[in-house]
Image: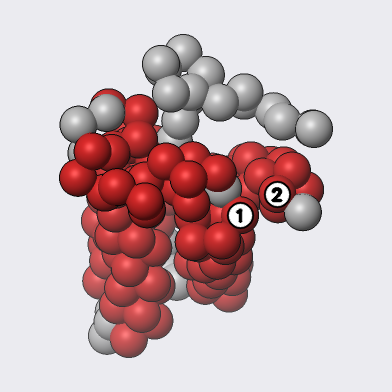
C-alpha cells in the first residue's frame, strides 16, 4: 500500500505542475493582455486547485499513516527529528509549505471566481497561484537534493 501510494503521489506532482503552468499562463496573459475571463480560465483554475487537493490528501495519508519516515522517524521523537535536516524536511517543512500552497490555490480560485471584473479575476489567480506554485517548487524533494526523490517513480 505504501509503495502504490508513494508512486501515485510522485506522479501526481506532474499533474499539479501542468495544471499550475496552464492556469498561470492563462492568468498572466489574461491580466496583462486585458482578455475577457473565459470558461477555460475557470476550468484550469479549478483543475489546479483540485489537483492540489488530491495531491494533498494522498500526501496526508503518506504523512500520517503509511510513511516510515514520519511514523518511525519523526513521530516517535519530534524533538530529535527537528535536529535532523532530512527528518525535519519530511516532518515539518514539506507538509507545512504544501498546506500553505493548497490554501493559496483555493483562495486564488475563490477570489478569481468572486472578483467583479475580468482583470481582477486574472490578477487574483496570477498572484495567488504564483505564490502557491513557488511554495510547491521550493518544497518538492527534487532528485538533486540530499533528501530528494526520483523525478519519476514507478515502483
> Which quarter of the figure is the N terminus placed in?
bottom right
Q: Classify 119 as above or below 18.
A: below
In what element is the residue under mark 1? helix
Q: Which residue is mark 2?
A: 2
Name the image quarter holding residue 83: top left
Q: Is residue 85 left or right of residue 142?
A: left
Instruction: Using the image, tell me which numbered label, if any, was put on residue 66.
Output: 1
Q: Classify 125 as above or below 132.
A: below
For image coordinates 35% across by 35% down, the residue present is 87
- The earlier-in-sequence mark between 2 and 1 is 2
> Which quarter of the figure is the C terminus placed in?
top right
Residue 53 in the image: x percent, y percent? 52, 67
For this rendering, which residue is in front, 139 or 84?
84
Name the image quarter holding residue 147: top left
Q: Residues within 10 Å of mark 2 (few under 14, many from 20)?
A: few
Q: Are marks 2 and 1 in contact (CB under 8 Å)?
A: yes
For this rendering, which residue is in front, 87 or 78?
78
Residue 86 in the image: x percent, y percent? 35, 28
Residue 127 visible somewhere in the drawing: yes
Q: Residues within 10 Å of mark 1 (few under 14, many from 20)?
A: some
Amino acid at each position: 500500500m505504501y509503495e502504490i501510494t508513494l508512486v501515485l503521489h510522485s506522479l501526481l506532482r506532474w499533474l499539479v505542475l501542468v495544471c499550475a503552468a496552464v492556469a498561470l499562463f492563462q492568468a498572466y496573459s489574461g491580466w496583462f493582455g486585458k482578455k475577457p475571463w473565459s470558461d477555460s480560465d475557470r476550468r484550469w483554475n479549478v483543475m489546479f486547485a483540485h489537483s492540489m487537493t488530491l495531491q494533498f490528501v494522498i500526501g496526508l495519508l503518506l504523512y500520517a499513516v503509511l510513511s516510515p519516515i514520519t511514523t518511525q522517524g519523526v513521530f516517535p521523537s519530534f524533538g530529535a527529528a527537528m535536529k535532523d535536516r532530512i527528518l525535519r524536511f519530511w516532518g515539518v517543512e514539506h507538509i507545512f509549505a504544501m498546506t500553505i500552497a493548497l490554501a493559496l490555490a483555493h483562495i486564488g480560485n475563490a477570489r478569481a471566481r468572486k472578483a467583479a471584473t475580468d482583470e481582477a479575476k486574472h490578477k487574483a489567480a496570477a498572484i495567488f497561484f504564483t505564490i502557491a506554485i513557488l511554495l510547491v517548487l521550493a518544497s518538492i524533494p527534487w532528485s538533486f537534493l540530499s533528501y530528494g526523490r526520483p523525478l519519476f517513480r514507478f515502483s
